[in-house]
Image (cartoon, coloured by chain):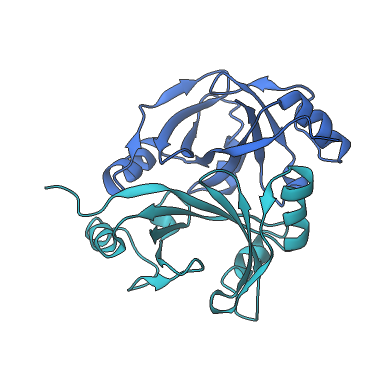
Chain colours: A blue, B cyan
């Protein structure tokens, strides 16, 4: 039976940082990459800065508000570090159904609208080689 | 003054794993990605498996031999996790000179030949937002 969904390219690698201005400056002024402005994403509890590096971006994340989903990671990793990797899929609902059937735990029952305005879901790191994996439908 | 070197795309994201067969199977059988065979890289103290996901690959790493450079990481991260990110440059010697002048510490005095047969250098995570960054000349 043909798969009802397909995996695509890596959309972004997310780096959580305690100082997003310094991190953005490192990519812009030291490495010479093109970086976006800092965007508040109140629905996701983060500020974001995107670093353009070919078809896969780096997404810099800094906590916004009291319940930021990356605060716990930064408490454990004071200098910051790679937080998650986002891989594109063409049909997130079929992907979720298939992955659940294969025993992969999803971190939400339904896909949610992510920071790029597209449906996303996170997979449990324990089922993904210790890596927090986000799937985004594009 | 024009820069004498340019940053390029993300070449790969490296994931260190205690079980490379299981990690490769996760990407191949669960996510449906194209994965390479397992390659021993005795000069680098690792086995590698490459996962093709558009122009940026995932590189799965597993220790080979007694002095593997990823053993310490796996001792601290038992289930594995994201180990480093590799970004391409067009002139590694100019990049190294420039980064040194900007106060970024390099993990080796000279570029070395990496797992893809091309010159590479690692930057100190403390100077890169807590992330181990590899530069590769392509």
Q: Is residue A20 left or right of residue B66?
A: left
- Residue B4, given in percent of the width and then of the height, sits at 20, 54
- Nearest the eye: A34 or B69: A34
In this rendering, the answer to whether A103 lies above or below A93 is below
Query: How many numbered circles does the render carry?
Result: 0
Q: Is residue A131 left or right of residue A79?
A: right
Q: Is residue A117 visible?
A: yes
Q: Where is residue B138, by image quadrant? A: bottom left
- Residue A114, given in percent of the width and then of the height, sits at 60, 23
Q: Where is residue B54, by image quadrant? A: top right
Q: Which residue in the rendered view is the most extreme toward the left?
A: B1
- Residue A129, given in percent of the width and then of the height, sits at 72, 52
Q: Is residue B18 left or right of residue A28?
A: right
- Residue B113, given in percent of the width and then of the height, sits at 43, 72
Residue drawn at (11%, 47%) of the image: B1
Q: Where is residue B30, by image quadrant? A: top right
Residue drawn at (47%, 49%) of the image: A79
Q: Is residue B19 visible?
A: no
Q: Which residue in the rendered view is the most extreme toward the front?
A: A1
Residue drawn at (61%, 71%) of the image: B46
- Nearest the eye: A33 or A131: A33
- Nearest the eye: B77 or A33: A33
């Amino acid at each position: 039976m043909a798969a009802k969904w397909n995996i695509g390219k890596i959309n972004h690698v997310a780096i959580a940082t305690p100082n997003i201005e310094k991190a953005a400056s490192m990519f812009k002024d030291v490495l010479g990459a093109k970086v976006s402005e800092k965007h508040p994403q109140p629905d996701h509890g983060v500020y974001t800065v995107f670093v353009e590096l070919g078809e896969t971006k780096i997404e810099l994340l800094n906590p916004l508000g009291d319940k930021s989903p990356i605060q716990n990671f930064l408490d454990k990793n004071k200098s910051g570090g790679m937080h998650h990797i986002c891989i594109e899929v063409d049909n997130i609902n079929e992907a979720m159904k298939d992955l659940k059937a294969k025993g992969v735990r999803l971190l939400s029952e339904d896909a949610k609208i992510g920071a790029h305005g597209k449906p996303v879901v996170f997979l449990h790191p324990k089922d993904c080689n210790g890596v927090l994996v986000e799937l985004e439908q594009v």
